[in-house]
Image (cartoon, coloured by chain):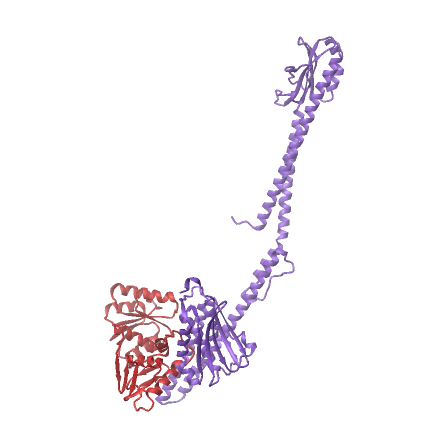
Chain colours: A red, B purple
Amino acid sequence: MRLLVVEDEKKAGEYLKKGLEESGFTVDIATNGIDGLHNALEEDYALIVLDIMLPGMDGWEVLKRLRAKRDTPVLFLTAMDELEERVRGLELGADDYLVKPFAFVELLARIRTLLRRGPPRDVEHMHIGDLEIDAIRRRVRRGGQRVDLTPREFSLLQLLARRRGEVLSRTQIASFVWDMNFDSDTNVVEVAIRRLRAKIDDGFEVKLIHTVRGMGYVLDLEYEDQ
Amino acid sequence: MRLSLTARLTITFVVITVACFSVVGVLLFKAVTRRIYIHDQTNIMLDARHLRRLAEELRSPDDVIAHKDRLIALVLGDNANGLRVIDREGRLLIDHVPLGYELPTQPAIPADQRIVPESIQSWKDHDGNEIRGVATTATLKDGESVTIAVARSLADRMALLDKYRSDVSLSLLAGLLVAVLLSYLLVRRALRPLRAMAESASAITAQRLSKRMPLQDAPTELLALATSLNEMLARLEQGFARVWQFTVDLAHDLRTPLGNLRGANEVALNRHRSIAEYETLLGSNIEECDRVSRTIENVLFLARAESPQFAMQRVVLDAAQELQRIADYFEGLSAEAGVTIQVNASANVYADRDLFRRAVSNLLSNALRYTPSGEAIRLRAANTEKGVDVSVENPGKGIEPEHLDKLFDRFYRVDRSRSDSANSTGLGLSIVKSIMELHGGAVSAQSAANLTRFTLHFPPMPPAALP
């Protein structure tokens, strides 16, 4: 899938391109608003990542002119963490936003959500290797053995399983599992993962829950463990 | 138009002075006029009565002529007076009118009728001056009758009053000038302390906030103003000092992770490393970045919480449910620390959900840090007379009293060396305080030898929010 990143800061553009390409996207970069708008109108992109502070033409203007002609999904990036700023972006037709500085996995997750179109798959039974999750009875088996989880541990496992192969940041996990929507000073998520891992992975050859250091956690059969 | 206080007061004083002067002047003028009028009336009346009595002593019109000088003597001495006597045939017996004005002999008061002030007539001479006079008939001894007319010209009175009027006007003008000058000088003098205050206020800048308004010379009225200004300055000075301290602490707090980043990267670049080592380094770099981000996010939260536009969504929260949820969130962390969390709540709290959770979480993570293994942290919520109290109580080494009131200051750490600054930004309790201020409540801390309790005081729910 082809993405357009409109970002004037060279370093930011470089790492976004690299990171997104390694996640399987084809990425074009525009370093100013005018080129960005031109590309966005001429080419067919699956999604556009748009910085707001741009030389030439700012992100708001790009968004407005783009929306007049096309409805390519737009995720905008802002350094201004003010409510009005976010509301303005969404009113102009943006689909989502991220406040700088953001975690790359967070950006990836948002992009995937926007591209997925439609609600995330809600599967009653999930099988990942020898891990079975019964979402209705809220039961978990690993290698045929019943695993006892607390309700929150179950929610955590379910989240990771649904987003299999996707790195989830601590903030995302805290928000999804406990509905705690703020950056905490504590390592609650770290500990919760450690305890979940003890119940799910301990004693098994194949580890399912992996730590991506500094970024978050991922559940999959194979992941380059660190 | 913007008038200075001096101008306003001066104008007021001058207006008052002029008004007083005018009223007094007009009243005095009227009184004098009235006095003169009464005086002249009386004189004319008495002269007429006297002349009639004298004439009645005389035998005949000829006798009147013979005693002309005696009769005239009565009105002599004032040029303004005039006397004319005629007999029944209209013969002029006496004619003494030095100013030569008209002196009619009709209508005449009959000889047997008393002469009263009301009988006096008024007319004008050809110059327009007022003349007042009266004519009366007198019966002589021989039975003949004569008509006596006496009058007085008021020309000199008018002149006198005119002079008096212009004198009064002149004094009024002089008084006005004196009033302007005196009031201006007095008002300026009276407002001198105000100017002094303005001068000392202009010397106060952000760098010199320690300066204060002088109080010793201030009059009573300004003392209250100066005192409250000084109190305001004291608060501002304190605020500035806090901001300054905050900036220094913030810089220090950002310097530590930056130092770690730079140092670790330099050491790593010193020689070739294994992929695993590089990966560890990058992971650690991201952790340091997270730490900087978290500090910035917290600082921004504190700054935004002080803005009046801060958006809050207050709802009625079941405290028991909320506290249990927060306890669940800390389930793993507390289990690892060997600490249990007990929830005992029976109250509704009117608060923003996310902010409530954030405040309690901050207190709980703080409590977890200081609770010994095997002990229990208690989360409570209960109605009080003044609203709802939500408390987080933990056993463990207490907090020294000297730290208690500073705990909520930004970046304040009881023990800088011991605190795990990698996890704690030192802003957690300030954020709790900010959140409580946003809710119109407060946070307090109590600590005894083996127990520490933080209490969030929420104000009572507004009637509109009651379920």
Q: Quadrant of residue B17?
A: top right
Residue B165 spot, x, y in % from top left: 64, 33
Residue A226 in sight from this viewpoint: no
- Considering depth in this image, is B150 or B116 the residue closer to the camera? B116
Q: Quadrant of the N terminus of chain A?
A: bottom left
Residue B304 placement, left or right of A124: right
Residue A163 placement, left or right of B244: left
Q: How many marks?
A: 0
Residue B186 in sight from this viewpoint: yes
Q: Quadrant of residue B202?
A: bottom right
Q: Is residue A217 above or below residue B182?
A: below
Residue A113 placement, left or right of B25: left
Residue B129 spot, x, y in % from top left: 63, 23
Residue A164 placement, left or right of B146: left
Q: Quadrant of the C terminus of chain A?
A: bottom left
Q: Is residue B177 above or below residue B365?
A: above
Q: Is residue A83 above or below residue B423?
A: above
- Considering depth in this image, is B309 or A67 the residue closer to the camera? B309
Residue A2 spot, x, y in % from top left: 25, 74
Q: Residue furthest front?
A: B346
Residue at figure coordinates x 64%, y 46% from the top left:
B182
Residue B10 spot, x, y in % from top left: 60, 47
- Considering depth in this image, is B160 or A191 the residue closer to the camera? A191
Q: Quadrant of residue A21?
A: bottom left
- Considering depth in this image, is B236 or B260 the residue closer to the camera? B236
